[in-house]
Image (tube, grey):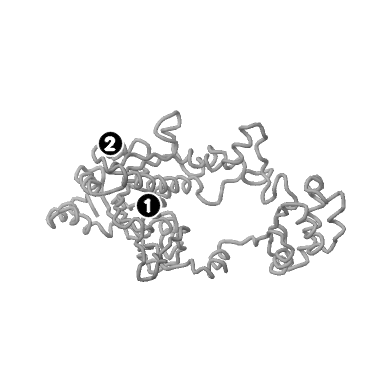
Amino acid sequence: MIHVMDQLPLPLEGITVVAVEQAVSAPFATRQLADLGARVVKVERIDGGDFARGYDTAAGGLASHFVWCNRGKESIAVDLKDPRGLAVVRRLVADADVFVQNLAHGAAARLGLDAATLCAAHPRLIAVDISGYGSAGPYTDKRAYDMLVQCEAGLVSVTGTPEQPVKAGIPAADIAAAMYAFSGVLAALLRRATTGRGGPVEVSMLEALVEWMGHPLHHAMHGGAAPARTGLAHAVIAPYDAYGTADGGRVLLSVQNDREWRRLAEQVLDQPALGTDPAFATNAARVANRERTDALVAKALGALDADEAVARLEGAGVACARLRDVHEVAEHPQLAARERWREVGTPVGPLRALLPAITLPGGAEPRMGEVPALGQHTGMLLRAVGMAEDEIAALRRDGVVA
């Protein structure tokens, strides 16, 4: 049994990560590493830094994407086009355990910062290349923004209504690539612990998101039709949808078998005879009579407010949920009860942030460090690699670092 006095360290304490990163995919991956205790050095452009800093000003004047993906990092602003700036990054990499980059295709190789080059020079280094479409093939040079990759991966084709395909409301391709980069680093660190060698890790947004297309993809590849877009409904289950309530809310429910239908008919619809009515008694019948089925459910729930509807459904053992907007999610009672919110420091003061989804044993809290200002740690990091104050002053004067 682990007591508080025996609290385990965070698993990545002592690991140093250098990241030449921008937007979401690489920054979200390295933020996971920072939360687990790694030191993450974020290399940014001197002229504005990571362009995600400028996406919006919604987070107290900061960009919401940047706040989300960049806590717990040290920012150094460097001009990589200047040989002296590139030399600074090489010195940082020489002392690192992990290097991550998601520059445009070919840019890292031109700088000598691609995984193959760095791993050849540093056999213990784990170097991650994140790209849109991978290092070879006809799409290698295509620009890869999240929405475009969602389209190429087929996600948009199965999302939306019968009339209108839509992209996911979150950057699904970026997040998928980030999480495979994160798990790839963890696997490579484990291998290095037993072999002493690092090595390159490659992740493409397209391949990451196509993996997430598992059920629709396998269904279609192996003889079935591509799943139809059904909005919040389900193509082969009824009732399975969102229904309006008397107070303007929407409640979703899912009836998974005929026993649940009978309970719904008796305890929520107040029409027990529907449980055995041939027009509704089986799922196949309910799907064939979907409009009539949905109308019965809509009428019953439309007479209740959302809280009462949820209570009745849960009492009947029918799976259900509230359709919440993002403001409601921020106040979700389950997240509050589990104390999942913390505050992180930022250049504009503390902001709320959600704990990482990985909960570790031993009482160790994730290291949810501050969101850095651009170049906040430049001087400290240059001194750490052995630069004298006059060298640093010269680099600042010449606009090589900021």
Is label 2 in a helix, a strand or a loop?
helix
* Residue 117, numbered label: 2
Left or right relative to 67: residue 123:
left
Pick the residue in front: 372 or 322: 322
Q: Residues within 10 Å of mark 1 (few under 14, many from 20)?
A: many
Look at the picture and state if 344 lies above or below 218: below
Residue 257 location in percent, x, y?
74, 52
Residue 189 location in percent, x, y?
34, 47
**Image point (63%, 32%), residue name:** 222
Q: Amino acid at mark 1?
A: Thr
Pick the residue in front: 125 or 325: 125
Residue 194 location in percent, x, y?
32, 44
Left or right relative to 99: residue 356:
right
Q: Amino acid at mark 2?
A: Thr
Is label 1 in a helix, a strand or a loop?
helix
Residue denoted by label 1: 30
In whole angstroms, how far apart are the C-alphas of marks 1 and 2? 21 Å
Screen quadrant of the C terminus: bottom left
Screen quadrant of the N terminus: bottom left
Number of disc labels: 2
